[in-house]
Image (spheres, rainbow, N blue to C red):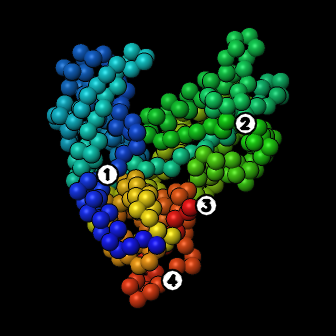
């Protein structure tokens, strides 16, 4: 059991470290944009500077609803002040690191709807059929790959590169299965071809991916592929080429996860059980700090091994629940007992327990 004195000491330390409250979180490299230019052009050319901001706005918004070019011209007349640094990329372009927090503040103030930065990973299962009728699974760069006997290269590298390039452009995380020995016991190319989602989800849990994009692909028909996007409880079927498929998925995610700065922050109480050490509190702090939906939080009450947090968040409550439910360190506590210290209105509370 953790003592109230220990809680008090932790709260004090978190306060001085600045962990009790925070602004928008960010995924690694989300605010880094690759531009087809050289270093000198970027430094002196305002048009290229605006191009970097425009690309970031595409990542942060839904292009079907927002005109990134128009927004850039209207709200970012001095783009240079939003550039933190830049460096050459591996393919002779320039990588621009932007001040994402400041850019988001401008967009929110302007009433532009953004979408969550802590975006769920998408697991991609592709079964490829050759002209000879042979099938194989597109796997990760570290997985059990199928090589071309003539070149010694991954036969499906082009397909992966196309998908990963558009995913980077839109700021979403995609992962292909390794198809190691354990995974080959669970799923094979015939399962993917038949669309057995239960087996795909079983593998995707290993990668902490809650959404699955799958297709059966004939290599001579890459321009018109039948896809299924298992997004939460929905199964979205559509036809598209490799590039357009990722744009479709990104737009669907932006539609579901978008929020507007003009919508007031909402309040909720998060109750956690199985908290019996300072380390446990540090884990909860990291979980809450990692979500861009959460704008502020603080410890509210402590009782035995229960800790209650007061929370301010943006967006929908169900999206907040979905974000928390994806974390493998906690799970919903259906047995939580409301004592006198807790409000008994369940609509204002979410209850979780820390997994040990």
Label 1's element?
A: loop
Residue at numbered disc 2: 180
- Placement of 271 over or under 243, stated as above or below: below
Q: Is 220 on the left or on the right of 268, as rendered?
A: right
Counting from the top left corner in percent of width and height, residue 230 is at 62, 52
Q: Residue at x 56, y 61 (%)?
A: 356
Number of the label disc, if any, that sits on residue 337: 4
Whether label 2 touches label 3, CB < 8 Å: no
Label 3's element?
A: loop
Q: Nearer the viewer, residue 336 or 218?
A: 336
Q: Earlier in the sequence, mark 2 or mark 3?
A: 2
Tell me how far mark 1 sits from mark 3, CA to CA. Answer: 27 Å
Number of the label disc, if any, that sits on residue 233: 3
Tell me how far mark 1 sits from mark 2, CA to CA. Answer: 37 Å
Q: Is 338 on the left or on the right of 215, as rendered?
A: left
Q: Residue at x 68, y 51 (%)?
A: 201
Residue at numbered disc 1: 24
Q: Residues within 10 Å of mark 3 (few under 14, many from 20)?
A: few
Tell me how far mark 4 sits from mark 3, CA to CA. Answer: 29 Å
Residue 257 picture quarter: bottom left
Disc 4 or disc 3, which is closer to the eye? 4
Q: Residues within 10 Å of mark 4 (few under 14, many from 20)?
A: few
Q: Is residue 258 among what the camera can see?
A: no
Disc 1 or disc 3, which is closer to the eye? 1
Counting from the top left corner in percent of width and height, residue 303 is at 41, 79
Label 4's element?
A: loop
Q: Earlier in the sequence, mark 1 or mark 3?
A: 1
């Amino acid at each position: 059991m953790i003592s109230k004195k220990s809680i008090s000491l932790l709260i004090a330390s978190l306060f001085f470290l600045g962990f009790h409250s925070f602004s928008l979180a960010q995924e690694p490299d989300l605010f880094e944009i690759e531009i087809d230019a050289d270093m000198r052009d970027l430094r002196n050319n305002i048009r290229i500077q605006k191009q970097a901001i425009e690309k970031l706005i595409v990542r942060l918004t839904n292009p079907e609803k927002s005109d990134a070019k128009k927004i850039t011209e209207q709200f970012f007349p001095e783009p240079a002040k939003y550039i933190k640094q830049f460096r050459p990329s591996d393919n002779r372009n320039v990588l621009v690191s932007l001040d994402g927090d400041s850019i988001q503040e401008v967009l929110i103030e302007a009433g532009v709807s953004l979408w969550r930065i802590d975006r769920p990973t998408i697991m991609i299962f592709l079964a490829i059929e050759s002209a000879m009728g042979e099938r194989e699974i597109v796997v990760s760069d570290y997985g059990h790959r199928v090589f071309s006997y003539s070149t010694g290269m991954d036969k499906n590298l082009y397909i992966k590169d196309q998908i990963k390039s558009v995913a980077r452009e839109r700021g979403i995380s995609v992962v292909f299965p390794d198809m190691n020995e354990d995974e080959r016991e669970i799923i094979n190319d015939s399962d993917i071809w038949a669309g057995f989602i239960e087996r795909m989800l079983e593998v995707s849990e290993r990668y902490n991916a809650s959404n699955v994009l799958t297709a059966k692909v004939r290599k001579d028909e890459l321009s018109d592929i039948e896809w299924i996007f298992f997004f939460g409880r929905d199964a979205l079927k559509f036809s598209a080429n490799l590039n357009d498929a990722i744009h479709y998925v990104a737009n669907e995610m932006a539609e579901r996860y978008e929020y507007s700065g003009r919508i007031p922050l909402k309040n909720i109480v998060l109750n956690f059980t199985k908290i019996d050490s300072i380390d446990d509190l540090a884990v909860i702090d990291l979980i809450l700090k990692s979500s861009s939906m959460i704008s502020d939080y603080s410890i509210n009450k402590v009782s035995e091994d229960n800790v209650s947090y007061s929370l301010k968040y943006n967006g929908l409550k169900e999206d907040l629940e979905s974000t928390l439910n994806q974390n493998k360190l906690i799970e919903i506590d259906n047995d939580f007992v409301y004592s006198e210290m807790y409000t008994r209105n369940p609509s204002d509370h979410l209850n979780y327990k820390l997994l040990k």
